[in-house]
Image (cartoon, rainbow, N blue to C red):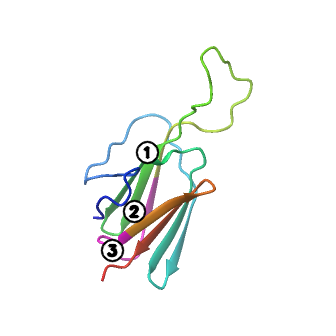
Amino acid sequence: MAKSINRHFQFLGSSKNVQSGRLWYPAADVYSTEGGWLVKVELAGVSAEDIEIDIQGNVLYIAGARKDKSCAVGVSYHQMEITYSRFEKTLNFPASIEGAMIEHNFENGLLIIHLKKAG
């Protein structure tokens, strides 16, 4: 499993902390590259410190929460269409990705993950 890639992201152990309640499932694109994989996950409004990443065998697990930090006390909503809750995304790969080198960053509301083949 990748270790300490970015201090803002939390890398999970083998157990997942799944909470009850309404989950949000963000959209993702996965590309095979010459050196491994490129994963893009749509996470507009999510802070890096609210994201968890885990690799187990051929599965990439991404979870976290989008929080509404812009509303003040005493505000009532007129219309709400954006989901503010925990999210999960599980992506299955055709072969093991365990041990892959992980690089990631945010670009315009997208979490970009590069999984580079080990060795």
Q: Residue at x 63, y 56 (%)?
A: 108
Tag count in the figure? 3
Which residue is tagged 1?
49
Q: Quadrant of the N terminus?
A: bottom left
On the image, the x and y values in percent for residue 43 come to 56, 51
Query: Foreground mark, 2 or 1?
Result: 1
Mark 1 neighbour density, 10 Å: few (under 14) some (14–19) many (20 or more): few
Q: Earlier in the sequence, mark 3 or mark 2?
A: 2
**What x and y, as percent, mark residue 51?**
44, 48
- Relative to 82, residue 1 above or below: below
On screen, 12 above or below 39? Answer: above
Residue 30 vertical placement versus 8 (above, below): below
Name which quarter of the figure residue 94 lies in: bottom left
Residue at 33% from the left image edge and 74% from the top image edge: 96
Numbered disc 2: secondary structure: strand
Indicate left or right for 68 with 13 as reference: right
User: What amino acid type should be assigned to the residue bearing mark 3?
Assistant: Ser
Query: At 53% from the left edge and 40% from the top edge, which residue is drawn?
Result: 66
Q: Earlier in the sequence, mark 2 or mark 1?
A: 1
Taking the spot 50% from the left edge, 36% from the top edge, the residue there is 22
Q: Residue furthest front?
A: 7
Q: Which residues are magenta?
A: 89-101
Q: Quadrant of residue 71?
A: top right
Tell me the number on the disc at residue 26.
Answer: none
Residue highlighted by disc 2: 60
Residue bearing mark 3 = 96
Give x and y (percent) for residue 54: 34, 57
Quadrant of the rendering where the C terminus is positioned: bottom left
Where disc 3 sits, the SS reads: loop
Q: Nearer the viewer, residue 16 or 37?
A: 37
* Residue type highlighted by circle 2: Leu
Q: Is residue 8 magenta?
A: no
